[in-house]
Image: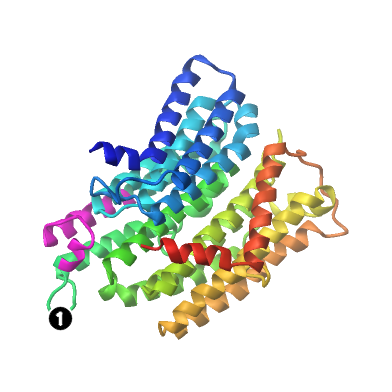
Amino acid sequence: MSLLDLLALLPILILVFGGTAILMAGAWYREPRPLLAGGIVTALLGAVAAGLVQPPTAEIAGLFSAGGYARFYTILWSLLAAAGLMVAARYVIEKKIGAGEYVSLVLYAAAGMALLSSATHLLGLFLALETFTLAFYILIASNRRCELAAEAGLKYLLMGAVATGFMAFGIALIYAASGSLALPEAVVRLTTTTGELHAWGLLGWGMVLIAVGFKISLAPFHLWTPDVYQGAPAPVAGLLATGSKGAVVAALVGMLAMAGPIWHDLVDLIWLLAALTMLVGAFSALSQKNLKRLLAYSSVTHMGTLLVGLLCQTTDGLAATTFYVVIYVVASFGAFAVIASLADERGEPMEFDQWRGLGYRHPVRCGVLTLLLLSLAGLPATAGFMAKFAIFHAALQSGYVGLVLIGVFASVISFAFYLRVTILLFQPEASASRWHKGATPEHAVLAVCASAVLLLGFFPGLLFDLIAHILP
């Protein structure tokens, strides 16, 4: 790796070396607040470096891109890591979790997500994916006093190992059939003169698709999701629901934009996966009585919607998918941040009975939660509506009318379970107990999430114009 490559990797190096320094400091210095503050500053420095420092080369060691698209997601994941640490600060202090270890793992995860979003090589894709997945194995089970956390960590570890096996085997088959792991070379060599994929290449891409299905909770590979979200601490579940899934989708957008119709022979299968995922997620969420499990199944529905955008393989479809990822990250993380801000010595409010009438006890945060949930549902005047509209518009242009009808139907169902939570929050006859008043960093994160959802709902062009300039 040359000096130019290292300079292009500056934002990632800031996250990695900053995380390592905090990890080493935490071995001797046990006061958590300076370590948490150091982690937040490191993540913000990584975002600033990605936004202001122009990389001297467009490609890093032939594995990762250093272009505008990669830098955009490096900024997003760095800011998400900073927000995750702000929300987790009180949790780390009260649960007496090692701050050095926790902060370093979050920064490592952000670095892995940034690398994954910029992958231009199948080997880089695999390495980056495993980098942040390993960090999440530990973060999910970080609260050793909680049995649910240990169970969630074990389930995520087992499912992650299965996904890793499929990914590695699929990449091996692609290499065996094409002789290359670089995109778009591998795609070109796998394609026959008739435009179809070689048999081994088709099998390889199919196995990669299965691994992706596990990672982003596509049905029927989603069964681990509600249990893991319920057992993981809310700050970790927020990062897992947004960053880990968003980074995989971002990598797929970059691959499709650069390598062309990778899924050409898998269109029917992806169509079926998208439809099944949206419907299974929506109907499963209807019967939930636990907010974190509801958010888990709702994330399944959103991943199905994102798959619709990926299936289009057009510029409009990929732009809509990128827009949707950003909006989903903001709204979903904000919902988990509300749960984390209310947590006290009793734990986190998860069961619906704990949320009945809570809007009268904590009106501001419950109002923010209502706004974020309605954005996830796709209420007009929120950013979530513009995100779904862009996805379905691109799908209509690509001729996927049936898939759009299924997506709209799933969105209508999602209004039912999101509104159910809103009604619970403001039931006049219910009397909820008070929860924690929240800390200033938590309130700041919620204010940013709510403002972003409203601003991009009224002015979506601000983000769409940026996306149009950065797409590979």
Q: Residue shown at 21%/56% (left/top)?
A: 182
Q: Quadrant of residue 427?
A: bottom right
Residue 388 position in % (x across, y down)? 55, 71
Estimate how packed mark 1 is, as few (under 14), some (14 to 19) or many (20 or more) residues with alpha carbons within 10 Å. Answer: few
Residue type at numbered disc 1: Thr
Q: Can residue 350 be seen in this view?
A: no
Q: Which residue is drawn at 53% across and 46% down?
A: 80
On whether residue 186 falls in the magenta region, the answer is yes
- Residue 123 percent location from the top left of the image: 24, 49
Name the residue that disc number 1 marks.
194
Extent of the magenta region: 163-188
Residue reaching furthest top?
A: 28
Horizontal side of residue 374 vs 73, given as left or right: right
Left or right, 140 with reference to 253:
right
In the rendered image, residue 317, in percent from the top left (x then y), is placed at 43, 72
Secondary element under disc 1, as helix, strand or loop, is: loop
State the colouring used for the structure image.
Answer: rainbow
Q: Residue furthest right?
A: 429
Left or right: 439 with respect to 234? Answer: right
Q: Which residue is drawn at 57% across and 34% down?
A: 146
- For image coordinates 72% across by 59% down, the residue present is 370
Residue 357: quarter of image:
bottom right
Q: Residue 128 appears at what percent x and percent y?
A: 34, 45
Q: Is residue 236 magenta?
A: no
For the N terminus, which image quadrant?
top left
**Does residue 423 appear in the picture of this structure?**
yes
Front residue (pair 472, 219): 472
- Judging depth in this view, the residue of 235 and 45 nearest the camera is 45
Q: Looking at the picture, does residue 324 appear above or below residue 18?
A: below
Q: In which quarter of the image is residue 191?
A: bottom left
Predominant secondary structure in magenta?
A: helix
- Which quadrant does the C terminus fall into? bottom left
